[in-house]
Image (cartoon, helix red, strand yellow):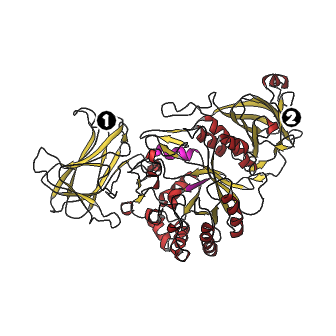
Amino acid sequence: MNRSRTLAALAALAIAAPAALAQTDGVYTMTVDTKAKGRAISPTMYGLFFEDINYASDGGLYAEKIKNRSFEFPQPLQGWVAFGDVEVRDDGPFDRNPHYVRLGGAGHREKHTGLENEGFFGIGVEKDALYNASFYARVPSGQKAKLRVEIENPSVNAESQVLASAEIEVSGNEWKKYAAQLRPYTTDPKARFRIFLVKPETEVDLEHISLFPANTFKGRDNGLRADIAQRLADLRPGVFRFPGGCIVEGTDPATRYQWKNTVGPVENRPLNENRWHYTFPWRFFPDYYQSNGLGFYEFFQLCEDMGAAPLPVVNVGLVCQYQNDADHQIPLDSLRTYIDDALDLIEFANGDPSTKWGAVRAEMGHPAPFGLRYLGVGNEQWGPEYVERLEPFVKAIRERYPDIKVIGSSGPNSEGKDFDYLWPEMRRIGVDLVDEHFYRPEDWFLAEGNRYDDYPRKGPKVFAGEYACHGRGKKFNHFNASLLEAAFMTGLERNADVVEMATYAPLLAHVDGWQWRPDMVWFDNLASVPSASYYVQQLYTHNRGDRALPLTMQGKPVAGNPDQAGLFATAAADDATGDIIVKAVNTSSEPRALKLDFKGMRGKQGFSSVETTTLHADNPEADNTLANPATVVPVSKTEALEMAQDYTTVLPANTFSVYRFHKAEVKK
């Protein structure tokens, strides 16, 4: 027994709730059945959802620093400032990115011909870090020419505006790739990139102008921004859903996300319109497009790096139903191309290199399969038009790839007529999981801790594919919303036989380019910061356990019931370590004295120590910012126990705590 605190002292600290029937002497006793078999918790239970919103891809996770690098925006020089004699042409070396620029002779040695790129809200560079500049070039005359590339800041004086530079000689009338490394002498979050002719009398053609940090995640070419990718890896996600939700649908069939346009040589991946650049008029970004440099190969590779199961989503033959009527539905007799895209994607991920799409993967550098097991078909679709399109997808996938788990949708809402219509249809069709979405206010999350307690135990599992607590008018993330997410997630874990995976959304947001909030990780051009919601997710992923054990208070699950004083809790067993993990959330404004009684531990069984990790903020509006990144962070401590079979503590007001109990070694 742990005698370090007496129940009397704890009771003095606790303040009883009005209907606190579950307390005795001011203490709330929770019973954990350590001998129960429990409900298996899927390794995919807690994961990540990625969508290219808020400049999450270009300008974010994708490390490329040049905007419109292939001149394929509707306005070919958008993002660039041209000076001197610059002409855009469209017979370039890459058939799906045909545009390039011709730099003409300026006719005077004091003048320059060239281009300056603004990047994504500027170009962030760090002192003494290396940056790889590259471009394709040719000299139409076949002669030699010299180009100068620079990282510069035009806002400072002439003597110091060039932060790094290199001169590159180009020659011949055939397209070739050229490269140089640049090392800035100072840090600048809002620099510019410039390329211009040194010999102004010579014409030079330029295409696919690029600037990457040498330090990408895992050091890869065409790689990911190291700090952001590491944030994702540090979560240890079990599943990674990509490439998004609404962007999968597109505004019209032409702008839907097409995975085949995102693989193969990066120079020849065609541009796609990003529907988020105009969706919110008050956050309008007319230069927000998808270069597809971060494509399906890179997504699969990231999943492998993180140890996460890949979960791609494909278009079901419907564009965004919020924006369109039936005119943009793909006729049922024209679905074959869409179905083939889904089947070909599975081949790309898992196929032998002797297959068509397996060969593409192998040629890109990954001959081994990626081990795809899940495929989402459609995003937030609803109505009979979704069901009648989904059915032939399921049939075709089952016939060719019976081991693939197909994920259907319950529509855009967590309840209501669309939800009530789709769930029975998903059961009838026989999908493996149903994707539920809920962006809801605080009172919803407080009331839904037992959401899955009465779900059917047979049939499709639940994928909580997009959720976030939107507190107080959907402001930036704040601690109270994150706390209620932690409370809600106890119900996911308790019902692990129903819920197979869950992913918070959205994932990333640029502080200068966001369209949607709240988000899990915020960033600027040089740094990133986890929100309180990030740490909630991390505490769950790092303490998932293998089996959800029964945890009750007076025989009932601890799910924020009226007589439970704002408490939520769940327990899990870690089979590899023997640890028992209890996650407890106090959503009330008063501390709660707790006693954890571990049923089934007898004789010499007990715990030698408990590691407690706590997430708390005195101010419910608190959250982390780039200026103050450590306002809300987990705090851990370890306490020695003496063969404890129960444990007493105080859970402070507005607090999420994870208790990891380590079993004592019994001497023979």
* Residue hosting label 2: 21
Query: Is 113 displayed left or right of 519 in the figure?
Result: left
What residue range appears in magenta? Answer: 225-241
Residue 191 lies within the magenta run: no
Q: Residue at x 36, y 60 (%)?
A: 267
Residue 292 position, x and y percent, is: 43, 58
554 on left or right of 216: right
Give the foreground label among 1 and 2: 2
Relative image position of residue 594 (x, y in whole percent) = 80, 32
Front one among 60 and 563:
563
Residue 238 seen in the figure: yes
Q: Position of residue 482 (x, y in %)?
A: 63, 39
Q: Residue at x 48, y 60 (%)?
A: 250
Which of disc 2 and disc 1 is earlier in sequence? 2
Q: Would residue 574 be seen by someone viewing this image from the given angle?
A: no
Q: Is residue 237 magenta?
A: yes
Q: Amino acid at mark 1?
A: Tyr
Q: Quadrant of the C terminus?
A: top right
Residue on which disc 1 sits:
185
SS at mark 1? loop
Q: Quadrant of residue 91?
A: bottom left
Tell me the amino acid under the disc marked 2: Leu
Quadrant for residue 632, please give it: top right
Drawn side of residue 562 relative to residue 409, left or right: right
Q: Residue at x 63, y 71 (%)?
A: 391
In what element is the residue under mark 2? loop
Q: Is residue 50 above or below residue 21?
A: below
